[in-house]
Image (spheres, rainbow, N blue to C red):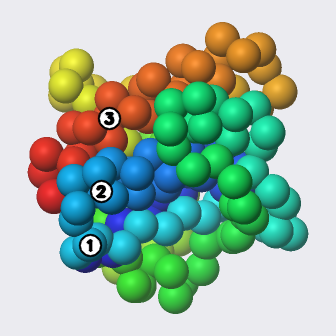
Amino acid sequence: MTILFVCTANIVRSFMAERILKGMLAKAKRRDIIVASAGLLDMGGAPGDPTAAKILAEHNFDGGGHLSRPYSESLLSRADLIVVMEKAQEERLRADYPQHGEKLRLLKAFSPEYDGVAGDIRDPYRLSSYHYRLCFAEIYTAIAGLLKCI
């Protein structure tokens, strides 16, 4: 199975989601899932956000060496599950790539608190450390829920 996380720039949210899931899978000794991430924007291979990388490291997840990449038809085609951070991202991918619509999910829909109306995981880019930590917590909680489904 291949899981692709997508956010706006692939330097904070999808980067953190990828690293958290990879860490959880390694801890569970699962090697049957490939995890990747990408952004809607082409950031030209920008490194992962330093605050996001720091928070990942504080929680014993690998925060180093990430370089952003834009999504592509090839990445979408190879994915069995495409997980986005915001409803607007889901709508854009559904409109542009309807053939992949069945594979699209909002990350927050995997949270235990999910009430049937998935909310967005807001982008903390250039906001306070509090916003990054909140983002990390929302992603972590949702990925723990996702892990139970795969």
Q: Nearer the N terminus, badge 2 or badge 3?
A: 2
Q: Are marks 1 and 3 in contact (CB under 8 Å)?
A: no
Of 71 and 89, nearer the camera is 71
Judged from the image, the secondary structure of the residue bearing numbered disc 1 is loop
Q: Is residue 81 above or below residue 51?
A: below
- The three-letter code of the residue at mark 3 reads Ala
Q: Residue at x 26, y 72 (%)?
A: 31
- The three-letter code of the residue at mark 2 reads Leu
Q: Are marks 1 and 2 in contact (CB under 8 Å)?
A: yes
Instruction: Say whether residue 136 is left or right of residue 57.
Output: left
Residue at mark 2 to residue at mark 3: CA–CA distance = 14 Å
Instruction: Say whether residue 21 is left or right of residue 62.
Output: left
Q: Residue at x 46, y 77 (%)?
A: 76
Judged from the image, the secondary structure of the residue bearing numbered disc 3 is helix
Residue at mark 1 to residue at mark 2: CA–CA distance = 7 Å
Other residues around mark 1 within 10 Å, as few (<14) / some (14–19) / many (≥20)? few
Q: Nearer the N terminus, badge 1 or badge 3?
A: 1
Judged from the image, the secondary structure of the residue bearing numbered disc 2 is helix
Q: Quadrant of the C terminus?
A: bottom left
Other residues around mark 3 within 10 Å, as few (<14) / some (14–19) / many (≥20)? many
Q: Residue at label 1?
A: 31
Task: Find residue 53 and report its horizontal and vertical position in percent.
Answer: 69, 41
Point out which mark residue 25 bears. Answer: 2
Q: Which circle, 1 or 3, is nearer the viewer?
A: 1
Q: Nearer the N terminus, badge 1 or badge 2?
A: 2
Q: Residue at label 3?
A: 142
Q: Is residue 139 visible?
A: yes
Of 91 and 112, nearer the camera is 112
Task: Find residue 96 and report its horizontal and vertical position in percent.
Answer: 53, 71
